[in-house]
Amino acid sequence: MGESRHHLFRQFSSSEWTGFRKGVEKEGLRVDRNGFIAQTPHPVALGSALTHPRITTDYSESLLELITPVCDNTTDMLASLRDIHRFVQMNLGDELFWSASMPCQLDGDASIPIAEYGTSNIGQLKHVYRQGLAVRYGRMMQSIAGAHYNLSLPDEFWKLWHQRLESGQSLKDFKSDQYFWLIRNFRRRSWLLMYLFGASPALDASFVEGVSHDLSRLRADTWYGPTATSLRMGDLGYHNNAQSSINICFNELETYTRTLARAIHTPWPEYEAIGTRRDGQFIQINTSVLQIENEYYSAVRPKRTTEREEKPIQALESRGVEYIEVRCLDLDPFSPIGVSQSQIDFLDLFLLDCLLTDSPRIDDPECDRLDDNYQDVIAKGRDPSLTLCRGGQRLGVGAAASALMDDLEPLAAQLDSLAGGDTYRQALESQRGKLVDPVQLPSARVLTDMEARGMGHREWGLEMARQQQQTLRDEGLSSQTRSDFERMSADSLADQAAIEADDHQPFAEFLEQYLRS
């Protein structure tokens, strides 16, 4: 079956293959000149975090999130992301934009201001959801930053693929099934992305103050995992006990939405004990395992653009999967924009091959093996003696990675022949170089660079942030682009004001209605 899908794809002509649709959401902390998390509100020059199409906040008022438009090539997407970064850097005043995934210096939960979105009901809902994350998991893990890569294939492709596979499904159901086909293989192989792109092997000592851990001391203010690739995705990062009690099924859309909906409607005793209000103020949306869908942490998500006040599950059920969101990428701290061209091109190749390779349903034993592979690479991926379970046998991590790279070669050559040039073969070779020389792995480069400069995580992060700010400010923006961004900011503030002026329903009533829908 896998070979037949690859064979069918090889029949695409250059006029039939129209490439990928893509976008990035890139997070990063605002910090002061001493490397401490910024205590200031979201800069007015950056517009409204509620309504701005390109610049918002994630968990914290200090955690910026920059969002590109949907693009049809990597060059345009990265150019857009760079423009957004330039505009942000020009409006940060004395503050800096932290370049690493693991945060700057913190001083406990109280030092991490929760994002504010104004007085409208939808703005308050976003704030209360974040309050819920604080009472459930604490604020520390919410200060971690990453890059999310969104990818879809155009409608022209899906129509042709529907014909070539001779599917009897509706196009909507077919697309959803095919995206889940891709997701199942992504889950089988996502460890490779942590190996190649994990870039958070160290963290500031303030992050683990009073927390038991098994990290090693690098410097007085820095802990690290000697062979770790991504502390961000490990036990100190995104995880929680309540979520481990649910079993979200990624095999198909119907089971995915059903298991996710069950988690949103299943009470969790610990959260019931907390309650939804404290001193008359809402502190979480509900007392279920999940408040909303987005609370579920996963390396990949099926997505559908939502309409105003529409829930993600409702959007998926009514209109099907529109794109997939890869959520496990650490920021590339060596790039002023957190991602790189060769990385994005490799992801396109990797994700398309996930669609074209045989992808049976994942049963519980396989699910456990996949989780083990993923966690092992996160915690000790650069240990040359590490073995992974692949195809029913144990393979060294380097050998397993090489085998996957070999599998990608024919597809890279085909994509290059369809598009012209050698983009995908170059992207593949760039990643293969890391297997030949593991000191090129980002997680190794971070530690090497810190040691070479004689710096801990905080000092090193500050130095990188200063250099990148200078680079981007020196590049500047054209007067037209700058005025476009200024207009976007002004329009977003006006949009927020209009939403607030039009909002007369009491929040408690709005929330009750939201939970019923």
Image (cartoon, rainbow, N blue to C red):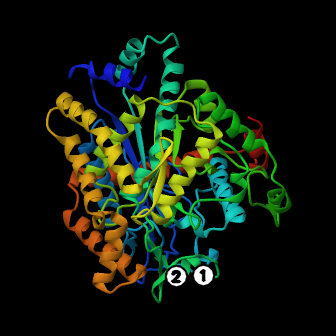
Residue 205 badge: 2
The amino acid at mark 2 is Ala
Give the crowd class for mark 2: few <14, some 14-19, many >=20 residues within 10 Å: many
Dividing the image into 4 quarters, which one contains the C terminus? top right
Q: Quadrant of residue 477?
A: bottom left
Q: Residues within 10 Å of mark 1 (few under 14, many from 20)?
A: few
For residue 80, above or below residue 333: above
Q: What kind of element bears circle 1? A: loop
Residue 257, percent across and down? 65, 34
Label 1, label 2: how far apart the Cα atoms are = 6 Å
The residue tagged 1 is: 209
- Residue 23, compared with residue 396, is above or below; it is above
In percent of width and height, residue 302 lies at 53, 37
- Asked whether the viewer can see residue 167, the reply is yes
Residue 292 located left or right of residue 333 = right
- Tell me whether circle 1 and circle 2 mark residues in contact (CB < 8 Å): yes
Task: Say which residue appears at 58% left-offset and 68% top-offset.
Answer: 236
What is the residue that sits farthest to the front in this orientation? 393
Please name the amino acid that badge 1 sits on: Glu
Q: Residue at x 63, y 53 (%)?
A: 126
